[in-house]
Image (cartoon, helix red, strand yellow):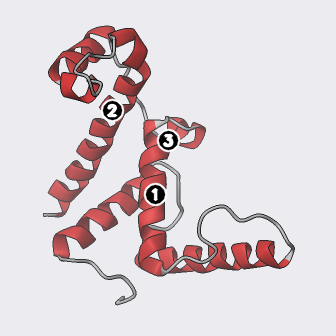
Amino acid sequence: MNTFCFSDEREKEYALACLDFAKRIGLIDDSSLKAVVERCDAENKKREEMLGNGETVYGLTRFSYPVYLDYELTRFRLDFVSENETVRKNYSFTPISKKEKKDFYRNNLDLFTRYGGDKFRFGEVAMIIEKKIREEQYENEIHNILHKLS
């Protein structure tokens, strides 16, 4: 399907792996690009109806297919990182120990440094650290899918 403008084959494979993972964790029923087009069309129709009814539409009033794919891929990552209910039902999250969080903090102090050079304390950023660790887990899952495909 030429509806999407991938810069190279790896970008397309990455997107397909993300869609596959989203299906595995219950966020979508169909991981095909054709289904992305259908979901985009449905979302555009919903937004058009909302506008016609004088309702507020947040974000874009109409998605192009590539922008909608990017929107979905971002949403999947955020749903995973925030451990939303649907994902928790379909994915076994490993607990993150305090040691893991502290190790991440020590190994990534540059992420927790203010403009003047002073650091945020561990307690101030513990929740952010958990989310960063979940982001790494998400990427590992995607790379596992890509590895199996190659």
Within-10-Å neighbours for mark 2: few <14, some 14–19, many 20+: some
The answer to whether 37 appears left or right of 73 in the picture is right
In the image, 142 versus 78, the foreground residue is 78
Disc 2 to disc 3, how far (Cα)? 20 Å
Q: Residue furthest left?
A: 150
The answer to whether 149 is drawn above or below residue 85 in the figure is below
Type of amino acid under label 3: Asn
The answer to whether 39 is drawn above or below residue 21 in the figure is below
The answer to whether 127 appears left or right of 54 in the picture is left
**Local SS, label 2:** helix
Image quarter for residue 131? top left
Q: How many marks?
A: 3
Question: Who comes first in sequence, dot 1 or dot 3?
Answer: 1
Image point (36%, 82%), residue name: 4
The answer to whether 96 appears left or right of 71 in the picture is left
Residue under label 3, please give it: 90
